[in-house]
């Protein structure tokens, strides 16, 4: 093996101990085969105001966590996950197993000194967590990084560099804005993965919103995008979800009039029975970093110029793990709402839930646990008249917003030969 760079990773404490058991065992993993046919495909029939992209045919279903109908890969791979016991890492494991598209020859988990030696139960056996080491990670074919940006900055390039390095799919924001590193939502720009061994996974809010926005941009063009997001506690990982649930219990046990005694270490204020109009730190322009991430990333993934203004307001709400977004799109072409609905119905990874008569619309309650993003409340915008469309999107932050997107990137790379 190629390099002798060793990295003892004790400074990064990232393990959420949800599935750690005390037994030890060998690395063993056999994904569940894909066996369920799915019927949603990209039709490619809508008119496009932009250069058509090769929207890949990733079939998902409105049924929760349904396995893909994509053929199982011919090749099998050694897959590494750094941060396998955190909220996102755990879902990466689940997505690999549930979808069964990527054939896993061997599964390796890497962790800090705190977690090394413990074992994680997977559906097909226990896997021992190895102490993270760059050389060991390089032995894998694909490494998912589900850890923080500092760790990714320190190690991602070393893991992936050279012909014999691993393909790295990084969930942090460390490389999202580097021009030479693809930032990928596979249904939109999956072809960018062909020539890169380091791929950045977008911010969850961006990925969820773009699943619905991109098909409409292709159909009607874009002049302007306004987004307001209502983001779940899971955006702050397992500690965020824990802070919300513990705080909620405490609030209900109290007088339900004040938040006195409700702890908040993760969020700026107690989240139970509250909304917080701040996610990430404030920037000089008055927006928060989260809001600017959505703007920067949407522009990069959809290849939009600076002449297309995109603005976002991001708000934390007391839900567990599905983000919601109101999106207003000012279009170049006149909007035909029936066509817009058809475009969304045919878009991969999207399920339309839109029937005011039956009170059908997207909600975190129904989007949680689903691979697809839900879209509804589709209407012409009163602000932009015939040239505007407004809609509501909900998507599981840990799945579409993180783990599923990362696994779909790997599936795309398997299909397009980038893993060869
Ligand atoms: C959040 N989007 O919801 C961020 C996490 N990636 O906090």
Image (cartoon, rainbow, N blue to C red):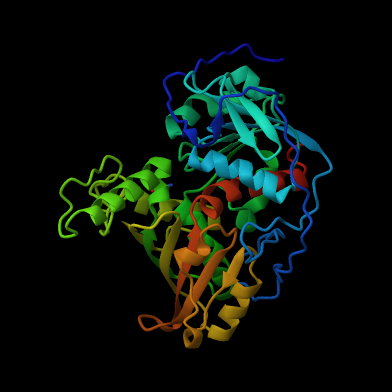
Q: Is residue 304 visible?
A: no
Q: Is residue 73 left or right of residue 349?
A: right
In the figure, 103 relative to 270: above or below? above
Q: Is residue 366 visible?
A: yes
Q: Position of residue 88 (x, y in %)?
A: 52, 42
115 and 344: which is toward the camera: 115
Which residue lies at the image location 28% right of the left edge and 53% below the top edge?
271
In the figure, 145 relative to 258: above or below? above
78 and 4: which is toward the camera: 78
Q: Is residue 42 left or right of residue 117?
A: right
Which residue is at the far bottom?
A: 357
Q: Would you identify the image quadrant in which residue 79 lies?
A: top right
Q: Is residue 11 left or right of residue 413?
A: left
In the figure, 218 relative to 72: above or below? below
Quarter of the picture containing the C terminus is top right
Q: Position of residue 18 (x, y in %)?
A: 50, 37
Which residue is at the far right?
A: 74
Which residue is at the far top?
A: 4
Q: Would you identify the image quadrant in which residue 239 lies?
A: top left
In the figure, 123 relative to 308: above or below? above
Which residue lies at the image location 45% right of the left edge and 40% below the top edge?
173
Which residue lies at the image location 80% right of the left edge and 48% below the top edge?
72
Q: Position of residue 387 (x, y in %)?
A: 45, 81
């Amino acid at each position: 093996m190629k390099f002798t760079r060793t990295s003892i990773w004790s400074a990064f404490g990232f393990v959420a101990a949800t599935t750690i058991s005390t037994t030890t065992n060998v690395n063993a993993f056999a994904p569940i085969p894909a066996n369920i046919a799915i019927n949603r495909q990209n039709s490619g029939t809508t008119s496009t105001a932009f250069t058509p992209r090769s929207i890949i045919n990733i079939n998902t279903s409105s049924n929760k966590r349904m396995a893909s109908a994509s053929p199982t890969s011919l090749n099998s791979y050694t897959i590494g996950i750094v941060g396998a016991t955190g909220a996102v890492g755990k879902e990466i494991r689940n997505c690999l197993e549930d979808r069964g598209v990527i054939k896993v020859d061997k599964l390796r988990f890497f962790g800090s000194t705190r977690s090394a030696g413990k074992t994680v139960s997977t559906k097909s056996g226990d896997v021992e967590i190895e102490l993270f080491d760059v050389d060991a990670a390089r032995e894998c074919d694909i490494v998912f990084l589900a850890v923080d940006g500092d760790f990714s900055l320190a190690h991602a390039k070393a893991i992936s560099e050279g012909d014999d390095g691993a393909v790295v799919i990084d969930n942090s924001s460390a490389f999202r804005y580097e021009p030479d590193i693809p930032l990928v939502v596979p249904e939109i720009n999956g072809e960018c993965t062909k020539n890169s061994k380091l791929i950045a996974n977008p911010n969850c809010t961006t990925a969820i919103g773009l699943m619905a926005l991109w098909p409409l941009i292709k159909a009607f063009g874009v002049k302007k995008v306004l987004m307001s997001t209502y983001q779940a506690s899971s955006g702050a990982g397992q500690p965020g979800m824990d802070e919300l649930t513990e705080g909620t219990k405490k609030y209900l046990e109290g007088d339900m009039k004040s938040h006195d005694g409700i702890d908040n270490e993760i969020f700026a204020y107690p989240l139970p029975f509250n909304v917080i109009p701040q996610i990430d730190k404030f920037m000089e322009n008055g927006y928060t970093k989260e809001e600017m991430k959505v703007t920067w990333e949407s522009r990069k993934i959809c290849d939009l110029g600076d002449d297309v203004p995109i603005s976002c307001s991001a708000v934390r709400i007391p839900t567990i793990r599905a983000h919601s977004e109101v999106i207003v799109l000012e279009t170049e072409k006149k909007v035909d709402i029936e066509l817009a609905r058809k475009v969304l119905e045919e878009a991969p990874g999207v399920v339309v839930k839109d029937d005011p008569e039956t009170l059908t619309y997207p909600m975190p309650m129904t989007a949680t646990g689903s691979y697809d993003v839900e879209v509804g409340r589709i209407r012409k915008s009163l602000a932009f008249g015939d040239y505007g469309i407004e809609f509501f999107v909900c998507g599981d932050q840990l799945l579409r917003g993180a783990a599923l997107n990362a696994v779909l990137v790997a599936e795309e790379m398997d299909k397009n030969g980038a893993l060869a």
